[in-house]
Amino acid sequence: MSCPPIRLRCLAQKPRLSWLLQRGPIALVTILTLCFLPFLVHAFVNRKAPKIQSAKLARLSETVSVRAAGSRNPTINLSDGHDVLTSYVGPEELRVALEQNQAEPLSLASADFDEDGVPDLVSGYAYNGQGIVTLLRGNVDSIYPNAPEAKQRKANGTSTDAPFLSPARVFEAPVGADFVGAGDFDADGHWDVVVASRNSKVLHLLSGDGRGGLAPATEIQLSGVVTAFATGEVNRRDGLTDIVVGVDGPEGAKVCVFEGPLGALRAPPEVFAAPASVTSLALGQLDDYYAMEVAVAAGDELLVVHGRDRKLTLPGEDQAAVQPARISKRFRLRLAHWRSVNSRATDSAILRCLAERAVPSCWRSLRSAKQNGSN
């Protein structure tokens, strides 16, 4: 018996050229969209960015406020100084006092408070029984005027060659800012400001937020009134700024060293006795050991608190095994008559002599301080 023939069913197939013609425009539109997307985003961002009015830009005054011409030192050349003309934002009373030059400028410090890679300037003032702290943001265009971004801002009229940007931010301080220090004093990764006033028993911490803002001041009590102040690295360097304060209290003159792995002002101070009221402090590597020392000018004596590793990141038993700091008397000078003429010049000369390790040059510096103070 013969089998019936098998009929094969053929499926029709679309030509490949027709498939390409149908999907080609979609692919072309997709490719063009991806190519032009960055330009569209850039145009949208530029349209949204606020325009800075040229009238609000900081600028330098036309008149010379500090004249540097005629310097006799050929190794250092300075340009003439100009006032930085800027506006202020902050509490109304303090802003008006600054604009009308009613506040007394007392101190300066520098750090990158807004974390844009350019140092900013903090200024301390006294006004009407309280203090004022201003923060001027550094201007990157004044450092790199030929950068593409700087050229674009210059073409748009939003650039200035002043070293700082306007407006300056204004913050209130409880006391006149005789001393201002900058550092990460609470170990949160942002620069802070600490303020102290002569004859005050309190340090005031204004914590930074990393965007150029400062929190309201918090108090750190001291054992006496402040007579001297310095900030920097002390003992083993850990990248956190330490604070050294000279105080006068019921138990006599003291030197308080604030340092700690959680921030200088989050740790109790290490206290050293001083033979007389501390008039000046300096921090640095003053011997052959790697740790940083503290130089103390107290009365007619110059003391050095030698640095060491306090092992503050180790357990308590390791910290207890650390030997007390060695304190040496560099030399003793009879300087009562010098200090009566110009105390600040004398103290600066003493500490400069310590760094130079030259007693004869110290006497020359003191003689120069005497002559400058009498003129």
Image (cartoon, helix red, strand yellow):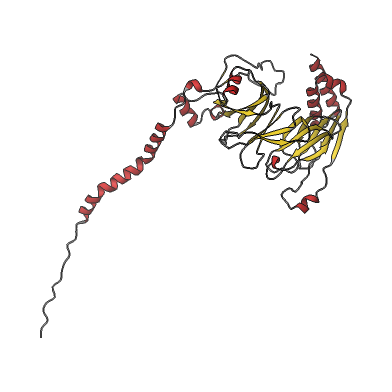
Residue 222: horizontal and vertical position, in percent? 75, 35
Residue 275: horizontal and vertical position, in percent? 86, 33
Does the rendering let one see residue 333?
Answer: yes
Q: How many marks?
A: 0
Task: Out of 373 and 8, give the one closest to the viewer.
Answer: 373
Name, please, the residue furthest toward the bottom: 1
Q: Quadrant of the C terminus?
A: top right
Where residue 169 sits, quadrant-wise, is top right
Task: Out of 103 and 163, give the one closest to the viewer.
Answer: 103
What residue do we see at 74% from left, 53% from top? 315
Question: Seen in the image, is 363 located left or right of residue 166?
Answer: right
Residue 362: horizontal and vertical position, in percent? 83, 26
Vertical side of 161 occupied by 245: above or below: below
Where residue 65 sits, quadrant-wise, is top right
Residue 8: horizontal and vertical position, in percent? 15, 71
Q: Quadrant of the N terminus?
A: bottom left
What residue do we see at 83% from left, 33% from top? 250
Task: Out of 97 and 186, give the one closest to the viewer.
Answer: 97
Does the rendering let one see residue 124?
Answer: no
Where residue 144 sits, quadrant-wise, is top right
